[in-house]
Image (cartoon, rainbow, N blue to C red):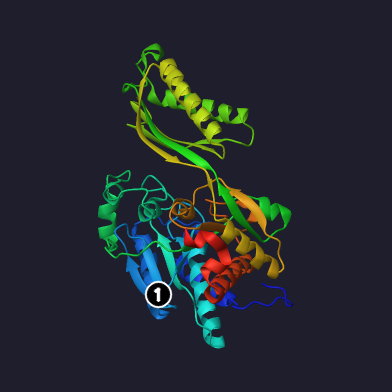
Amino acid sequence: MLDQTTTTAAPVNADRLKAMMDGVTVFGAGSGGAMTRLTLSREDGAARDWLKAWFADHGFTHKFDGMGNQFGLLEAAGAGAPTVMVGSHLDSQPNGGCFDGTLGVISACEAVVAVTEALKKRGSASRVNFTVVNWTNEEGARFQPSLLGSSVFAGSAELDWALDRKDGAGISVREALADIGYAGNDHVPIPDALIELHIEGAEALDREGRKFGAFTRYWGATKYRLAFLGRQAHTGPTPMAERRDALLAGAYLIADLKAMAGDYGLDLHTSVGRLEVFPNSPNTVPAEAVLFIELRAAAPDILAEAEARMLADVDKAATRAGVGHEVRFIDRRIAGAFSPGLIRLADEVSLSLGETMRRLDTIGGHDAVAMSAACPAVVLAVRSRGGVIHHPTEFTSIEDQAFGTQVIADMLYRIATEGLDTVIGEEART
């Protein structure tokens, strides 16, 4: 927890924080720490119901919009006052971990409660209202693209287009929302600032023995859903020279992407994280192989160059395997920077709690990335053991969870008592 000599204006309750985490983890939990809570699944619906009940028990007004984004509103300052939104997402990867996303929602709940308790104890008025958020489909594991709910909320994606996205079974977002009872129509305005807490998902903090960091910038990403199109045939009698193996082309491209990343050192990440093969039978030459390709880089010129090289490699792989190809979907996310004012505030608060904040890049996407175009936003990070993320062994100690939550609570307390424009400056008025 905090050092005994450290004082804070709005102390968080680590036992309460742990109880909340334990309470929501049962929905989708598996063996060995595994979590499978795909967005808009029945498990996700149960976790949402749990959060809805928590909002009701703690005086929050529960709302959910057309994308099923879930909000808990606390009008601490009255109508018309600025609003600070805090939170993350409850959906997980298949066979993922328990902390990715979920910690951000739970810490938001605890931080807001700690601040309101402190304000009440001191008889102080708040200058801002608070909203806790659980975004829909951050992970992009079931529906693509990722960051779907926050992108619609921020205005960078159309609602009807997003609702029409389908999973591998042909179920649309619209249908899945209705199935779990979260097809909403509430209107929640864009906040005046957004703060998100996340496990780092890399090993810088753990390696250096640090508790806390802030992502100052985010990498860009270009994501393709690309299909190689071959010809179905029997793997026994069909001569090797006559086969038009779509999966073989995919294998060539996957190897080329790995080799290309090596040419850029630490400046480019490439991957094929998902592969869909048809008809996917052991004794049938694949007629179709769909690759979910990702290119990530901080520099726009590197990202553009990598995309051009990838497309050339696609042509080469198709020619080599004797198959065709087609692009079925492209998602682009530009690189950028988070709010300097919120980063500065997090730095000041962390230092006051006895820790020097580590400045970090985020290579993965977060909802705060989508929201950065709409309001000042930041993602804060606590260490994950070994840098593990998207895996059942993902782990962040309760002490580190509480520290990150305390940073958020103290940030919110300063904003509530001093005013958002005073704390983060000109950003609050643009």
Describe residue 84's horizontal placement relative to residue 122 as left or right.
left
User: Foreground residue, 267 or 338?
Assistant: 338
User: Foreground residue, 234 or 344?
Assistant: 344
Count neighbours of disc 1 (C-alpha within 10 A) and say few if under 14, some if 14 to 19, many if 20 or more.
Answer: many
In the displayed structure, would residue 282 be above or below residue 128? above
> Can you give x and y, in whole percent of width and height, for residue 216 in the image?
59, 52
**Furthest residue to the right?**
5
Q: Quadrant of the N terminus?
A: bottom right
Residue at 32% x, 57% y is 67
Q: Amino acid at mark 1?
A: Phe
For label 1, the SS is helix
Q: Which residue is mark 1?
A: 55
Residue at 38% x, 22% y is 245
In the displayed structure, would residue 142 be above or below residue 225? below
- The picture quadrant where one finds residue 72 is bottom left
> Can you give x and y, in whole percent of width and height, for residue 73 in the image?
39, 72
Asked if one can make out residue 220 in the rendered structure from this viewpoint, the answer is yes
> Can you give x and y, in whole percent of width and height, for residue 294 in the image?
48, 37
Describe residue 50's horizontal placement relative to residue 169 as left or right.
right
User: Foreground residue, 391 or 349?
Assistant: 349
In the displayed structure, would residue 336 be above or below residue 6? above
> Can you give x and y, in whole percent of width and height, for residue 333 in the image?
46, 42
Residue at 27% x, 44% y is 170
Residue at 72% x, 68% y is 354
